Image (tube, grey):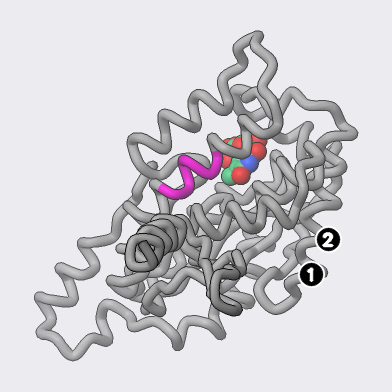
Amino acid sequence: MILGLHQSSQAFSCYFQSLGIGFRPRSPGIFQIQMMRQRSRPPRGLFITLEGIEGCGKSTQARLLGEYLRSQGHVTVETREPGGTPLAEKVRSVLLDRADEPVAAETEAFLVFAARRQHVAQVIEPALARGAIVLCDRFSDSTLAYQGYARGLDVPLLERLNRLATHAVTPHLTLLFDLPVATGLARRRSATELNRLDGESLRFHRKVRSGFLDLAKRHPTRMKVVPARASKETVARAVARIVAPMLHRVHRADSHTAAPHAATSRAAQVHHALR
Ligand code: TMP
C-alpha cells in the first residue's frame, strides 16, 4: 500500500514536472507546489525582441537590423509573434481576424501562448542552439502589455503561463520603440490593412504604451527604450549603437575557424522565417 502510494505520487509529480510545476516534499506526506524554473541549456546565440505599440516602426527596424547584422557577417533568423511557424501563423490569423464574434481576454492569452510554445520549440530554441542571432518582432512583453496591462488579466499569472510557453527562454535584449499613441495609430492606419486589435480604442492603446514603459522600468537591463518618432535611418542608428556592444557574444559566420566555403554555407543559413 505504501509502495503504491509512493509510485502514484511519483507518477503525479512527473506529470506536473512536465508542465513546469514541481512538487517538493516538505515533511513526510506534505507536498509544496511550486512553479519550477524550466531547465534549459544556455543558448549560444543572441535573442533580440522588438516591441512597441501599433505603428511604432518595429517591423521596419527588425528588417534594417537584420541587414546590418548580416553585413557584419552574422547569421540571423528574423521571425515574428504571434506566428513564426505554419501552425503559429494559423493561430495568428484566428487571433487577429476581424470576425464579429467577441473574443475574451483569456482566449486571446491562450491563443498567444499556444502559438508561442510552438514558435519557441520549432524556431527560436533551435536557432539559438545553432548560435544565430534571432530577431523577433514582438514576444512575451506584448502579452503582458496587451493582455495584461490593457485587457486587465493578472500580470504575475501571465508571467507564469509565459514561462510554460517559453520554457523560460528570455530575450537578451528587448528594444522598445516608443512614440505617442496618436502618431503610431495614424502611421498604422495609413500604411496597412487593419487587424482586430488595431481597431481598439485610443484608451486601450494608451494602456498598452504605458504597460510597455512600465515593463521597461521593471527590466532596465534587458529592455531599452528607443524614441521612435525620428526618421527610420536615425532610429536604425540608435538601434545599432545599442546592439553593437552585445555582438561579442556571438561568432560571426566569417570568423569561424572553418574553411572559407564553410563560412559561406553558414551565411547561406540566413533564414527569414516569415518574410
Ligand atoms: P503586429 O505584430 O503586426 O503589430 O500585430 C500583432 C498584433 O497582435 C498586435 O495588435 C498585438 C497583438 N499581440 C497581442 O495582443 N499579444 C501578444 O502576445 C502578441 C505577440 C501580439
At 56% across and 20% down in the image, what residue appears? 97
Q: Secondary structure at mark 1?
A: helix
Q: Residue at x 50, y 32 (%)?
A: 92
- Mark 2 near ligand 1 (CB under 8 Å)? no
Rendered image quadrant of residue 89: top left
Q: What is the three-letter code of the residue carrying label 1?
A: Arg
Q: Position of residue 194 (x, y in %)?
A: 64, 23
Nearer the observer, 257 or 204: 204
Q: Residue at x 55, y 40 (%)?
A: 112
Query: Which stretch did the figure color magenta?
Result: 112-117
Q: Quadrant of residue 270?
A: bottom left
Residue 77 appears in the rendering: no
> Given the current orientation, which residue lies at the most extreme right position?
203
Indicate yes or no whether the magenta region holds residue 90: no
Magenta segment's dominant SS is helix
Comparing 112 with 157, the one in front is 157
> Which quadrant of the frame does ligand 1 lie within?
top right
Position of residue 29 in the picture relative to residue 77 (left or right): right
The label on residue 214 is 2
Q: Quadrant of the C terminus?
A: top left
Residue located beneath label 1 in the image: 218
